[in-house]
Image: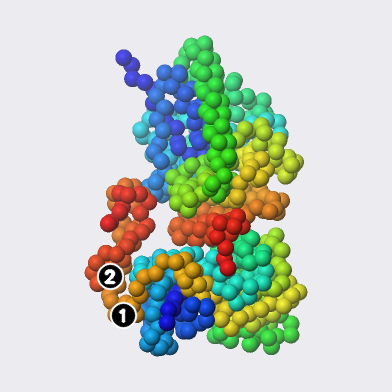
């Protein structure tokens, strides 16, 4: 039997958002998806080594994952996701991702697709083009895309349903982590925050576990002119959840351009709910984060009358 | 008589307060941390003990500040709490109707907004220490002035120099430039104080409604130039308490008193040998830096590990 083609998926950036679609599509085509391990310091340090200084921490971590994969797989899967609709755009680093990777790791073999609705590049056509590189049978490719897409949607619905249940839990303080999924779920960035919040006996709510369409509609209540797709979704989740939660944590990696503007917008527009702004960079220890989170939870508890300062 | 000890170990200074059942301060001490929190606490306990009568028994201990964990382990503290909560409790005990607490410390700056005695909102500086105590002391060094005298110099100025204090690096080059083209020293110092206040209000205090009564505390509150600059910028009176630097210690002592648990505390702790050791875990690629604390050669606590693989006990 011929060995399966090994396709490496870096565990960073949009992986967390589209992981079910990506892995299932590759599997359905008869290839073997290999996902790099959870971020650790070694991956981070290799990522920093292969990035320009001005890049954000999340993109540096991504480069570390590519570096981990590149000698272990036949192809590395690095898509370009530029826009999901006529009215939005992602961050420039996501625009340039395949180019950055190809120009950093000389000779690396990439698998990519180019999702850019503003320029007429739709997901379906792009996935078919990508699929044909791994499997010559167009019918297999079409059915692989359909199956993977259905699984992704099912997964998203399940996540949302589970979260709605958590929101009904009245006993615990509920804190929304409003951040990109690649920050929220990263082992070095968001995990320590989530872990510490759970240690403080709070229920963690995630901004990405919400219907995308509803979120984008809701974001218009805060700003109509915002065009960064992922920030629209986060802001929309804040708007949708703000009456059901006790506090918001804006978790940002340094130096994220879109977040620096949108977080400020959020702090100015959302009133009557405590917001903590946590900025993470590659040099930071955990002590500052703990101080901020602990005091934040103390404040919320005091507001809820759980404990009083006096 | 029962008493309660609160220790606030900041990056620059270490503060200790001992209170009685009614929150009256029985003993207080303020000294520099000088990069050695263990030694600072030892000296602190020495200083506190001298002020106490023999019949006083310390029933509970609380620690706060950036070295709260380390010192908490050493003193076997019942409460280890962040400084924001501690400051709020301390200030509220002296000013029950305070609405806004401005605080500028050695590395941090924070704002706490209170509503009816409950912390309603707060903000803290992010990564950067611009506009905090360490910024002022490094500029003081450059100008050849003791940072403690900054306020006095600032008050002499009639025409404060405009200084860009958004970033310490820019501020420093701006300051050198202004000095070289002939601005007076007191004008520059007054400009720095103004810049600290406006930087604080634009960053930490962004979007917050600052309502009187306002209490200003932390090491920088001892600088009357900054206090004046705040009063001008906000247009309200800013209160600086004579115990302003002790609020964290006082707050954590009150917290220790109220939390219910008690434990024997012995001042002899200052004669014990405490050692800390930092080591890399090496058990996975994360290489967590684990700090362990030894009392008379026996491991009493450790932290820094991300998972149980790094557990030392």
Say if B76 sits above or below A123 in the image: below
Q: Which of pointers 2 and 1 indicates the residue nearer the eye?
A: 1
Disc 1 packing (10 Å; few <14; some 14–19; many ≥20) = few
- Check the residue under mark 2 and report the chain it is in: B
Query: In the figure, A265 relative to A3: above or below?
Result: below
Using the image, tell me which numbered label, if any, was put on residue A96: none
Residue situated in front as seen by the camera: A150 or A275: A275
Side of A263 relative to B45 (left or right): right
Q: Chain of mark 1?
A: B
Residue shown at the point (50%, 61%) measured from the top left:
A291
Q: Is A120 in front, or is B28?
A: B28
Q: Nearer the viewer, residue A256 or A179?
A: A179
- The number of numbered discs placed on residues in the rendered structure image is 2
Residue name at image x 43 percent, y 79 percent: B2
- State the residue position of label 2: B295
Query: Where, quadrant-wise, is the N terminus of chain B in this rendering?
Result: bottom left
Residue A287 pos. (x, y %): 45, 60
Residue A305: give x, y in percent of width and height. 59, 57
State the image quarter where residue B189 is shown.
Answer: bottom right
Q: State the SS at label 2.
A: strand
A245 displayed left or right of B236: left
Assign a secondary structure to mark 1.
Answer: helix
Question: Quick one: label 2 or label 1, which is nearer the N terminus?
Answer: 1
Relative image position of residue A233 (x, y in whole percent): 63, 38
Q: Residue at x 40, y 30 (%)?
A: A34
Q: Which residue is label 1 attached to? A: B268
């Amino acid at each position: 039997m011929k060995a399966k083609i090994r396709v490496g998926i870096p565990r960073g950036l949009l992986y967390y958002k589209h992981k079910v679609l990506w892995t299932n599509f590759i599997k359905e085509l008869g290839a073997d998806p290999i996902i790099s391990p959870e971020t650790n310091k070694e991956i981070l340090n290799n990522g920093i080594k292969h990035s320009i200084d001005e890049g954000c921490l999340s993109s540096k971590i991504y480069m570390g994952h590519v570096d981990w994969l590149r000698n272990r797989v036949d192809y590395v899967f690095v898509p370009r996701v530029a826009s999901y609709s006529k009215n939005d755009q992602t961050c420039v680093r996501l625009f340039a991702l395949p180019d950055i990777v190809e120009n950093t790791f000389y000779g690396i073999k990439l698998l990519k697709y180019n999702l850019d609705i503003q320029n007429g590049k739709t997901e379906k056509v792009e996935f078919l083009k990508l699929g044909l590189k791994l499997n010559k049978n167009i019918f297999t490719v079409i059915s692989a895309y359909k199956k993977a897409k259905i699984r992704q949607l099912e997964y998203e619905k399940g996540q949302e349903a589970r979260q709605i249940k958590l929101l009904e839990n009245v006993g615990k303080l509920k804190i929304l982590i409003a951040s990109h999924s690649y920050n929220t779920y990263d082992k070095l960035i968001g995990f320590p925050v989530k872990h510490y919040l759970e240690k403080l006996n709070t229920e963690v709510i995630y901004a990405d576990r919400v219907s995308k369409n509803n979120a984008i509609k809701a974001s218009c209540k805060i700003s109509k002119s915002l065009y960064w797709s992922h920030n629209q979704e986060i802001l929309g989740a804040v708007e949708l959840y703000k009456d059901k939660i006790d506090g918001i944590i804006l978790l940002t990696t340094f130096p994220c351009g879109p977040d620096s503007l949108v977080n400020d917008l959020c702090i100015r527009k959302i009133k009557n709910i405590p917001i903590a702004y946590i900025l993470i960079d590659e040099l930071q220890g955990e002590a500052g984060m703990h101080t901020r989170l602990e005091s934040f939870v103390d404040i919320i508890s005091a507001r809820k009358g759980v404990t009083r300062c006096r | 008589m029962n008493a309660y000890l609160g220790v606030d170990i900041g990056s620059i200074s270490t503060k200790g307060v001992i209170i009685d059942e009614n929150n009256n301060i029985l003993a207080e001490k303020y000294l520099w941390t000088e990069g050695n929190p263990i030694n600072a606490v030892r000296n602190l306990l020495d200083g506190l003990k001298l002020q106490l009568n023999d019949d006083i028994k310390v029933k509970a201990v609380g620690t706060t500040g950036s070295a709260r964990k380390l010192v908490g382990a050493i003193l076997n503290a019942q409460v280890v709490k962040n400084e924001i909560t501690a400051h709020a409790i301390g200030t509220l005990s002296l000013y029950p109707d305070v609405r806004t607490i401005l605080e500028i410390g050695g590395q941090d700056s924070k704002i706490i907004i209170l509503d009816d005695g409950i912390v309603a909102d707060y903000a803290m500086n992010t990564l950067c220490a611009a506009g905090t105590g360490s910024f002022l002391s490094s500029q003081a060094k450059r100008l050849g002035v003791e940072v403690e005298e900054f306020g006095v110099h600032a008050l002499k100025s009639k025409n404060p120099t405009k200084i860009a204090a958004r970033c310490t690096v820019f501020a420093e080059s701006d300051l050198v430039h202004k000095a070289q083209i002939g601005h007076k020293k007191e004008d520059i110092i007054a400009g720095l104080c103004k810049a600290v206040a406006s930087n604080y209000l634009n960053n930490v205090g962004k979007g917050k409604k600052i309502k009187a009564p306002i209490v200003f505390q932390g090491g920088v509150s001892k600088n009357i130039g900054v206090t004046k600059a705040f009063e001008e910028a906000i247009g309200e009176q800013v209160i600086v308490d004579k115990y302003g630097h002790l609020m964290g210690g006082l707050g954590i002592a009150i917290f220790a008193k109220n939390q219910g648990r008690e434990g024997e505390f012995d001042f002899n702790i200052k004669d014990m040998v405490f050692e800390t050791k930092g080591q890399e875990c090496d058990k996975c690629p994360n290489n967590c830096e684990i700090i362990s604390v030894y009392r008379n050669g026996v491991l009493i606590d450790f932290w820094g590990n991300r998972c149980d693989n790094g557990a030392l006990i």
